[in-house]
Amino acid sequence: MVKDQEFLEKKASYCIGLAKKLGATESSVIVNNSVSETVNFRNKKLDESNRSDDLGISITTYIGKKKSSISSSNLLDDNLNILIEKCVETTKNTPEDEFNSLPDKDLLAKEVKDLNLYDDTYIENEKKIDYLNKLESAASNDKKIINTESSFNQNKSNFILANTEGFCAGYKTSSFTASSVTVAKDEKSMERDYEYSSKCFFKDLEDAEELGKKAADQTTRKLSPKKIGSKKIAIIFDKRIAKGILSTFASTISSSAISRGTSFLKDKVNQKIFSDSINVLDKPDILKGLGSRNFDREGVKTDTLKLVEQGVLKHYLIDTYNGKKLNLKSNGRYGGTSNLYFENGNISFKDLLNSKSKSLYITETIGHGSNIVTGDYSVGATGFLVEKGEFKYPINEITIAGNFKEMFQHITLANDLEFKYATNSPTMMIEGMVVAGK
Amino acid sequence: MNNFFEKSDISRSEAENIVSDTLSKCDDGELYLENTKSETLLLDDNKIKNSSYNSDLGFGFRAISDEIVAYSHSNEISKNSLRQSSENLKSTLKSVKGTYNHEIPKSNKKYYDNINPIEQKSLNEKIKILNEVNNYLRSKDDNIKQVTANFLGEQKSVEIIRSGGESLTDVRPLIRFNVSVMLEKNGRKESGVYGVGGRQSYDFYLKDDNWKSVCDEALRIASVNLESKPAPAGEMKVVLGPGWPAILIHEAVGHGLEGDFNRKKTSAFHNLMGQKVASEGVTIVDDGTIDNRRGSLTIDDEGTPTEKTVLIENGILKNFMQDRLNARLMKTRSTGSGRRENYRHIVLPRMRNTMMLSGNHTQDEMIKAVDKGIFAVSFGGGQVDITSGKFVFNCTEAYEIVNGKIGSPIKGATLIGDGPSSLKEVSMVGNDMMMDPGIGTCGKAGQGVPVGVAQPSILINKMTVGGTKL
């Protein structure tokens, strides 16, 4: 069982009290516990079971404008005494920084709304095994599938965030995640792909057979890939890749990248950075949302932000420290976005595929090729050649490259948005990028 | 050495009894105890931005029967918690009929000292160096707009208790010092990053102003990039410099030679044992026994002493890297490659220091042999798709080669190749083998572990360069 609020609150107030006694002028503490159970299958047989019970505490102490922090997984009072003493001692010896402080009191969340993030259902291992049996038998129907590895995870977490401004709140969350990775083989090639579903509530989880079938289909269609020549071609990003481009956008507008001057979107608020039709929202109060929350990791209330309106950048993602540095108020984005998404475009998926005589549909990228200082982008890619709206043949061992500054201006979105992850995008087409192949 | 039972309500012998009782009919397994102390000090934007300390304590209890692994971990080393874990393992492995394999090789060799690097330098000394780094760099070049420097120090104590009470221990120091700079000139911004590290004290890297060479290198890379032009797109010859570019080997063949993927036959290499997978003259080893290196280990996380494992000898595939589970199922022995990020994770076969050994060509010969291609000197990271064998790595410092001469610097680009075939395209192996500076972290199944790489300069006949210039 995950630890209750009372236990976490007791630890939190003990730490805050002790920090004060040892000379901290202000402090904040997060105590969390998560209990997670995973069952893994391989080739229709039980392969692994894993249970984890994780406790954690992190404390930040301030002495005026000096700050330091500690974290530990050992919550015994003996250990906490040593660590808090060390933390306060380190704080004393750390140079001042004028922007160090707890959040402004009036920005802290006043109420904790029930966002429906906790499902009390306990899924016994037998039931997990039952789900995986169904999943794997659907995934291995096709003879070309030579290996399946699937997993079912149940996670229950609880936390308390408290600080010396009197803030003390937290709540339970849960997640149920199923995934399947399959390997397919023919005479010419061996390929791997996956499918995944994650929900706050067990009853919302994707049907096991559906999930297994998708994983297998997505894998077998990649067999016998070709390499194409180097050229400029329109690129269509599958939703699971398009969301990554949205995440990169989020990191370029984080207040830390902006205040340090290491983002190509510095000083671009109220300027047009995307094509006209693009809107980006960050909405923290979606019921059962995978990124939903009442407040950020500093306790600051998190409201919905329309980050991009008709292509124009409207907000940065601001935390207390970098906000003070930029002379802006925190908008509750310490630790990043909540439920971030592109609003739907006005063209169907089918029409998007049909919009060019030839295009490249990308289902996977590898490598860490995004540079947020310069906007340069270059990654390895796998996908399909699309001709007249049809998938012609699979493609691999190519790279796709461009610069986000131009890429953002040439985005067309389909109208097929769904909330599968915390960050979501409809299918996305970008024109003007370069493919390097043969 | 850490006494994990000192402040616990369970004695060592009680814990041993629970381990022996739980594992009696299993094929393998152990109780893994870990205590890690780590610190981070970060200077950024002219200020000490972060000083933090972490103390992490916990255990992971593993039982293996045939192919099935049951694992349970917790932060509380207590009677209750260990018993609950034992029950979890037993409920997964209901009808086990194995025989516990007590055999584990022994060695007295140690590849690093039992030190706690965090305690070896005071906070004030470390802050002083970070401030000096900042001042030194900002006074060196007017175009510097941002300097970030950080220290990471760690001491990890582990104990492995096997069925029957056998205990194996290790204390592992690890440090890292990193500098990153951003330059701005005529409205253009570029950055450069460099770092050093290993399993020893900060002093080794920081005495006598050694830190200045780290700063100079980060600044040099950023300065080169300020002058860079768009990288070419397409297949061409590639010369890789010595040292860190060996992440090519790590991605192209390293991961594909890990035992688990080959037991499951999901690696592009699984049916190539004994066959030619690289050009003649290419020898690749994975070595955990080099003193004080980031990827070195006295014992792995199952207690097996590490070794130098020959993976590819003169182009022929010789060995996979194995942990105990995959070795048993493939009827071979562990190569001391069983590693985990920490007690929260199960053991997987992983790389340590992966190295291509020297040949007899010079870098000059290689450059001269290229009409049109690129010379890649410094890299970010890489990634591989084990099954298709396709791998990438991102250059952060590269130059064009035109008619046998090094030309202008080019923008960072991703290079993509095919693991099983790319090392057959190696046409020259240099005589200048070099270790990386000690900064690598390898990710697999959500677990990061410190690793090293090394190689001489090499010439690859054909790779796809992912630039934007057609």
Image (cartoon, rainbow, N blue to C red):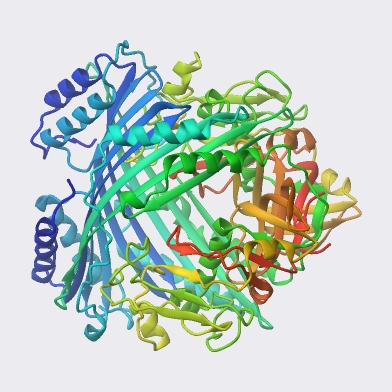
Residue shown at 59% from the left, 41% from the top: A217
Q: Position of residue A116 (x, y in %)?
A: 27, 63
- Is residue B59 visible in the rendered image? The answer is no
The image quarter in which residue A101 lies:
bottom left
Q: Reply above or below: A260 against B13.
A: below
Q: Position of residue B222 (x, y in %)?
A: 64, 67
Locate residue A31, reporting x and y percent: 20, 59
In the figure, A339 relative to B312: above or below?
below
Q: Quadrant of the N terminus of chain A?
A: top left
Q: Would residue B114 appear left or right of A278 to someone viewing this image? A: left
Between A233 and A123, the one nearer to me in the picture: A123
In depth, the one of B332 and A115 nearer the eye is A115
Q: Residue at x 23, y 30 (%)?
A: B88
A158 left or right of B8?
A: right
Quick one: B87 or B422, which is closer to the camera?
B87
State the image coordinates of residue B261 (x, y, percent, origin top left): 54, 29
Vertical arrangement, residue B229 with respect to residue A138, above or below: below
Q: Nearer the viewer, residue B182 or B337?
A: B337
In the picture, residue A408 is in which quadrant? bottom right
The quarter holding residue A52 reads: top left
Q: Taking B157 as reference, is B367 left or right?
A: right
